[in-house]
């Protein structure tokens, strides 16, 4: 087994072990961190690997969360069927959005998907009893299915499993011909098309897969606190996702994970150290990383590994 695969395996073991150990406030924070990492991984593939700056990603996170709750507690479907229905809804809606949107490039793609995200948020706010309006939906809980409780450490393991599933799917895609096609389109569409890559189909497929994975993470989020509201699915968390990818290292899976962990935990740590001025410190950290580490935090890890390798060769 190579060193890289061994590192990923040890990371997976650590994720599951922490899921069983952490409880209370720290356990809840850890669940949110796992969901953030899963969401960041899928957005990194869409933006960093396939080159599509689509601001609709957070909307599909909300579609998954609201979809499973509405289907279960408003329509009355059993939870397993509601989960399937929410996943299918994310897939179909992402395909409907992707067909016209992926024909656009750069700023125009960002603007079109931003309009969709804003429309979704307006629907949540104006949805009345169906979406709960600005207050959202509360007072629901998932019963245990397949012998797995829907709360505590056991549910954190479920979320960890979804993160691992998301990472495995994206890694397999990235290592396949599809991943090479996505990177070729990102780097130079004309050259990719000359090599026989179907630009439109590849973009649509990347958009649908990553948006559906975002929806699956949203389904898990719905039962993390048993409360959902529109503020979670606005532009602010979306821009934070974008910063996570840039700070961590655009187009690198390890960079997305590192950026998500650092920027998710930074406000918690800075607030404890400098009090109510933590947002200023948070902004300064992000600006410094962007200015002095253009390859992201993962670039520091690469330099450290290169120095270790060079030191080993000298010995």
Image (cartoon, rainbow, N blue to C red):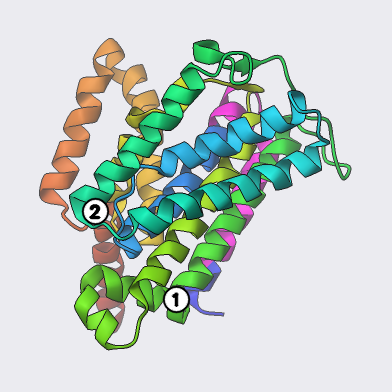
**Residue at horizontal 63 percent and vertical 20 percent from the top:** 130
Picture quarter with the C terminus:
bottom left
**x, y percentage for residue 173?**
49, 71
Tell me the magenta residue range: 7-29
Q: Residues within 10 Å of mark 2 (few under 14, many from 20)?
A: many
**x, y percentage for residue 281?**
21, 25
Of 272 and 131, which appears nearest the observer?
131
Say above or below: 135 vs 240.
above
Mark 2 or mark 1, which has the lower sequence index?
1
**x, y percentage for residue 108?**
22, 49
Say above or below: 32 vs 300.
above
Q: Name the residue carrying label 1.
A: 178
Task: Determine whether the residue tagged by mark 1 lies in a helix, strand or loop.
Answer: helix
Q: Which residue lies furthest to the left in this view?
A: 291
The label on residue 296 is 2
- Quadrant of the rendered image containing residue 184: bottom left
Q: Is residue 122 left or right of residue 31?
A: left
Say above or below: 69 vs 39.
above
Q: How many angstroms separate mark 2 from mark 1 (CA)?
A: 25 Å
């Amino acid at each position: 087994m190579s060193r890289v695969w061994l590192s990923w395996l040890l990371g997976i073991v650590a994720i599951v072990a922490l899921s069983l150990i952490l409880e209370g406030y720290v356990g809840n924070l850890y669940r949110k961190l796992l969901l953030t990492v899963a969401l960041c991984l899928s957005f990194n593939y869409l933006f960093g690997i396939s080159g599509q700056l689509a601001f609709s990603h957070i909307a599909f996170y909300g579609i998954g969360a609201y979809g499973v709750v509405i289907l279960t507690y408003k329509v009355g479907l059993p939870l397993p069927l509601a989960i399937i229905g929410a996943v299918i809804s994310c897939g179909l809606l992402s395909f409907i959005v992707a067909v016209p949107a992926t024909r656009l490039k750069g700023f125009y793609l960002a603007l079109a998907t931003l309009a969709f995200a804003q429309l979704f948020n307006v629907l949540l706010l104006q949805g009345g009893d169906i979406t709960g309006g600005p207050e959202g939906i509360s007072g629901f809980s998932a019963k245990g299915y397949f012998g797995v409780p829907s709360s505590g450490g056991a549910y954190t393991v479920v979320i960890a499993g979804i993160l691992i599933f998301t990472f495995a799917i994206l890694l397999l895609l990235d290592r396949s011909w599809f991943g090479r096609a996505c990177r070729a389109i990102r780097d130079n569409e004309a050259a990719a098309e000359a090599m026989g890559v179907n630009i439109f189909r590849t973009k649509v497929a990347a958009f649908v897969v990553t948006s559906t994975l975002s929806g699956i993470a949203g389904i898990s989020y719905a039962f993390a606190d048993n409360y959902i509201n529109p503020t979670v699915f606005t532009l602010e968390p979306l821009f934070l996702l974008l910063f996570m990818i840039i700070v961590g290292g655009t187009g690198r899976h390890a960079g997305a994970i590192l950026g998500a962990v650092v920027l998710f935990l930074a406000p918690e740590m800075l607030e404890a150290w400098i009090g109510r001025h933590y947002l200023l410190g948070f902004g300064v950290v992000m600006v410094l990383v962007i200015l002095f580490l253009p390859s992201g935090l993962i670039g520091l890890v690469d330099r450290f590994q290169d120095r270790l390798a060079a030191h080993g060769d000298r010995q």
